[in-house]
Image: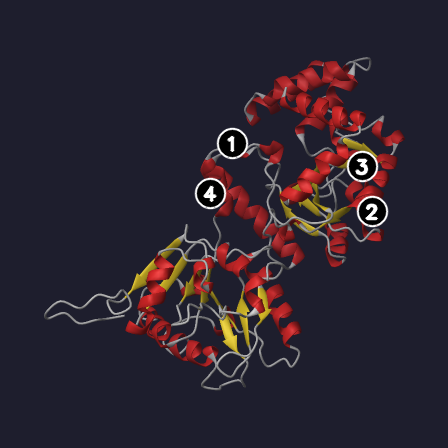
Amino acid sequence: MRRFLHYCWALFLAGSGNLWWAKRNLRQQGAVVVLMLHRVLSAKSANVTNSSLDMVVLRETFRALVDYLRRHCEVVRLGDARPGLAGSRLMSVLTFDDGWSDNYSEVFAPLKAANLPFTIFICPAVMSSEMPFWPERATWVLRKAEPNLEPSQINSVIEALKGLWPAARDQHIARLAQAFHLEDDSFRSEIDRTLPWVEVTEMQAAGVQFGSHTCRHSIVTSIPMSELRRDLKDSKVAIEGNLLGECVAFSYPNGNWSQEARQAVAARGRFVMAVSGGHTPWVMLRALADEDVPWASVHIVQVDERVAPRGDADRNLTHLRASLLEHAPLPAAQIYAMPVEIPDLQSAAAKYDAELKSIAGTPPVLDLVHLGLGPDGHTASLVPGDPVLDVTDRDVAVTGVYQGRNRLTLTYPVINRARLILWLVTGIEKVPMYKRLQAGDQSIPAGRVLQNNAVLLADRSAAGERAGEGERETA
C-alpha cells in the first residue's frame, strides 16, 4: 500500500507540474535521493527474463535517466553522500543490487561515459551463475509447467513463497519441478546470469564501488544469528580477497533488517583509534602498552600533526611511536602517519583522507577518537579563527600557522562520525574552557564536537576542584 501511495504521489507531482517544487524542497533540506536499481535490459531481453519486471528498467529508459541525472543532479559515491547540505543540485546516489551481468553490459558504459559514480552489491557465492536466486528459478519452473500463465499469476505464487523459510521454499520449488517432470532439466537462462569476477575487477579499476549483499542473498531476518554472522564474514572475506580492498558497504536483501542484524553487519575485525598529541596522551598510551590488548587488530591514525621533519621532537608521530612501538606488540604498519613531509600540503591532506577511507570505510567511521582541550578552546588542530573550522566537505584539512607551525588535522565531519569520543583534559589552565566545554559552548572550537557519544575525563585541576587532604591530583 505504501508503495502504491508513493506512486500516486509521484504521478500527481509530475502531472500537476509541481515536481519542481518537490525537488526544490529536497535540495533546500539537503536530502540525498538514493536510486536503488537491479537490472537494465533491452525490450527483447525483458520479454524472456525470469526476473520480476518490477526489477527491470528498459535500456532506453535507463539512458534517459542517466542523461537526466547528468544534467540536473549531483550524483555522488555512496560513502560521499552527506545529508543536510543544501545545494543548487539535488544530491543523488545510484546503486544496483544482486550483481546481474547486465550491470556490466548495459549499465557500466553509459555511466562511465557520463562520469557518474555507482555502487553494485554482489553475492560472492553465486558469481557467474545462471538463475542463482530462487524467484527466477520458481518463475522458470512455472513457465515450463504452464506456458500460458499470466505475470500476475506468477507474481502471486512468488509472493506466497516469500512467506516460507528458505528450506521449505526450496522444497516447494523442487516438488513443483518434480510434479511436472522437470527435475532432470537444469536451470538455464543466459540472460539471468550474475557477474563474473573478471568484469567486477574491470569495473572496480574504473572506479565502481562494490559492496556485500550477503553470500547468497540470504534474508537476514530469516536465518539464525550464528549463520548470519558466518555469512557476513564469508561475504566480506571473498569480496576483499578478489578485489584487494576493504569491503565497507552492505545492502540488506529485500530490505529486511532487524536491530540484531544491524549489529552483526556493523561488527568488524579491527579497531581504529585516532590519537591526539600532547604529554598526557603519551603517558596514557605508554600505560596502555602494558595492558592485554589484541594489538594485531588495532589500527592507529593521527588526529593532527605539525609540519616538521621526520623524527623532529615537534612531531606527534615521534612520541606516538616511542610510547607504543617500543613497548607494545603493535605492528608498525598499523600506525598511519599523516604525510606532512609532502611539500604540497593540500595533496598530503587528500592522501591521508584517502588512507582513512581505506582503513575505516567510505565515509570513514573511527571506533574511537581521543581529543584534548587547549587553554584557548581548541581541540585537534581546530583553533579559533582558522578557516579550517568551516571545512565540511573533507575529513582532513590543512591549517594556518599556529604556534609557529602549519598542521594537518581531522575535521569536524570525521570526528563527529566516531563511535566514541574520549576527552582527556588536565591542568589548572584548562578550567575556563573545561567549564565551557561541559556547557556545550559552541563559540569555542571544542564545543562544536558532538557530545552524544563522548566521554569526558578530567583531573581535579582541570575540573576546578582541590584535592582532598592526603589525595594527589592525577591525570
Give the mark, 2 or 4, whose residue is nearer the N terminus. 2
- Amino acid carrying mark 3 in the image: Val
Q: Which mark is residue 71?
A: 2
Element under disc 2? helix
Horizontal and vertical percent position of residue 280: 34, 73
Q: Residues within 10 Å of mark 3 (few under 14, many from 20)?
A: many
Is residue 475 toward the left or the right of residue 330 in the image?
Answer: left
Element under disc 3? strand
| Occupied quadrant, residue 162 | top right
| Occupied quadrant, residue 441 | bottom left
Structural distance between the alpha carbons of marks 3 and 1: 28 Å
Which image quadrant: the N terminus? top right
Give the mark, 1 or 4, whose residue is nearer the N terminus. 1
In the picture of the structure, the residue carrying the numbered disc 3 is 40
Q: Residue at position x 54%, y 42% from top? A: 231
Horizontal and vertical percent position of residue 358: 59, 61
Reply above or below: 398 against 256.
Answer: below
Q: Residues within 10 Å of mark 1 (few under 14, many from 20)?
A: some
- Amino acid carrying mark 2 in the image: Arg
